[in-house]
Image: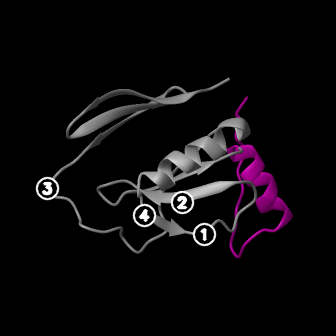
């Protein structure tokens, strides 16, 4: 089972671990003061059993919610203190792609996830 957690934090930043990926977050006075209008964001898979407690921690922290979930599965779209758009999703990329195959949007092209 992949786990996600904070592995270090300090007054102006934190390191997060999501599976095998680590993310460095730092507060920077030079960054934007609000989220950008585009949809681009980073999505993290979380277990279904952890989703509700993670959702509650994020919303209780006061993190801005930038979009309601309109995709398959449970998702929460929120912004970090620097306005970066993030998502936690209680599913995985394969599940999201299956939903896209079932209801493709205009211009969608799907490619194999694995190569031989």
Question: How is the protein colored in the picture?
Answer: one colour
| Residue 98: percent from left, percent from top | 81, 53
Q: Nearer the viewer, residue 23 or 78?
A: 78
Which tag is nearer the camera, tag 4 or tag 2? Answer: 4
When asked about the image quadrant of residue 103, the answer is bottom right
- Circle 3/circle 4 CB separation < 8 Å: no
* Secondary element at image label 1: loop
> Disc 4 and disc 2: Cα gap in Å?
9 Å
Residue at x 74% of width, y 45% of height: 94
Query: For the image shown, how many numbered marks are present on the structure?
Result: 4
Q: Is residue 70 left or right of residue 82?
A: right
Q: Residues within 10 Å of mark 2 (few under 14, many from 20)?
A: many
Q: Which mark is residue 10?
A: none
- Circle 2/circle 1 CB separation < 8 Å: yes
Q: Residues within 10 Å of mark 4 (few under 14, many from 20)?
A: some
**First along the sequence among labels 4 and 2:** 4
The kind of secondary structure the magenta stretch mainly shows is loop
Q: Which mark is residue 64?
A: 4
> Disc 3 and disc 4: Cα gap in Å?
18 Å
Residue at x 58% of width, y 56% of height: 76
Q: Which residues are magenta?
A: 92-116
Q: Is residue 97 left or right of residue 68?
A: right
Q: Is residue 65 left or right of residue 30?
A: right
* Secondary element at image label 2: strand
Q: Residues within 10 Å of mark 1 (few under 14, many from 20)?
A: few
On the image, numbered disc 3 is attached to which residue? Answer: 29
* Secondary element at image label 4: loop
């Amino acid at each position: 089972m992949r786990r996600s957690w904070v592995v270090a934090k300090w007054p102006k930043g934190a390191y997060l671990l999501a599976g095998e990926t680590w993310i460095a977050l730092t507060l920077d006075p030079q960054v934007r003061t609000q989220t950008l209008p585009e949809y681009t964001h980073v999505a993290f898979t979380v277990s279904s059993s952890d989703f509700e407690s993670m959702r509650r921690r994020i919303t209780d922290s006061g993190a801005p919610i930038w979009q309601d979930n309109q995709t398959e599965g449970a998702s929460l779209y929120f912004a970090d203190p620097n306005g970066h758009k993030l998502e936690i999703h209680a599913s995985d990329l394969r599940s999201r792609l299956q939903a896209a195959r079932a209801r493709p949007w205009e211009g969608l092209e799907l490619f194999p996830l694995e190569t031989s």
